[in-house]
Amino acid sequence: MTGFGKGVASCTSGEFAIELRSVNHRQIEIRVNAPRELSSATGRIEQTIRSRFSRGRFDAHVRFEVSSSRSVFSMARAKEAYAALLGLRDELAPGEALPFTTLLSMPQLFVAELNTEDNALKDAFERALGAAVFSLDETRTSEGAALASEFTARLSSMRETIKKLDVMLPRALSDHHQRMSMRIQGWLSGREFADPARLAQELAIASERADTTEEVARLVAHIAAAEVATTTEGPCGRRLDFLLQEMSREANTLGAKSLTAEISHLSIELRAEIERMREQAQNIE
């Protein structure tokens, strides 16, 4: 599911800004982009996201704006940057002057003197992370409500299709039975070995093979379970995955047993609705 959340919190050392983005994904995948000085935050962010969400691809961006009184010039970064600039100068403009003042225009060379064990810093980070997760959860919940509404409409459409089948199937089965009886009677006409009991048995077997009562009953049960899943608090994506897989199996069997073109068309409608829901359910929390 898609969503966006942002949390901001300050302390004496500076200000945290944490942004979380999520997009559809069948499993859970987390990528964290944080300053080197706060690399320890990666594990905490991953732990928090995994404890709250079960599906989605998450991108977390952590920024920390250092208080001016806490920033210092990083000699190590300055040496790396100046060496890179010299290499670029030698390649593009050999002999060109490269003053040290060039480094002053690079804000990334000024880093914070951060004590990651400082309680105030930890508290600010936790507050920013909590606000970002809460905001992200709100947007995902909003999208989930919209998807639940769409699922409800599609499940209702399936129920209407099944009502039509309930009317068609008994009549189609009776007509099928009569056609088979007439064909077999015609084929056996005038043959001395025609056994009425055997004929009745074969007709019963053929009728049972064409009967779709069980498939329709299971479809109705799965639809009811899916309706419950979409209205119950908590994650339901994997539950819907399973139910829709079972619905697809029953709808396929129903299509294979279709006795008329009308029933075949209705089974195709059912399968089309199921496939639309399956694509969405794979990304639901």
Image (tube, rainbow, N blue to C red):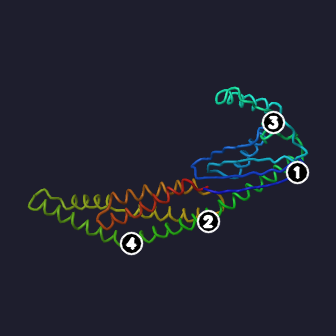
Question: Which SS class for mark 3?
Answer: helix
Q: Amino acid at mark 2?
A: Ala
Q: Which residue is mark 2?
A: 145
Q: CA distance from mark 2 to mark 4?
A: 29 Å
Question: In this view of the protein, which residue sits in the foreground, 235 or 140?
Answer: 140
Decide which of 161, 69 is in the foreground and name it.
69
Question: Which residue shows up at 67% across the image and 26% down it?
Answer: 94
Q: Nearer the viewer, mark 2 or mark 1?
A: 1
- Closer to viewer: mark 3 or mark 2: 3
Check the image and report above or below for 3 versus 74: below
Which mark is in front, 4 or 1?
Answer: 1
* Local crowd size for mark 3, using a 10 Å CA cut-off: few (<14), some (14–19), many (≥20): few
Q: Amino acid at mark 3?
A: Thr
Q: Earlier in the sequence, mark 2 or mark 4?
A: 2
Q: Which residue is mark 3?
A: 101
Q: Residue at x 76, y 44 (%)?
A: 44
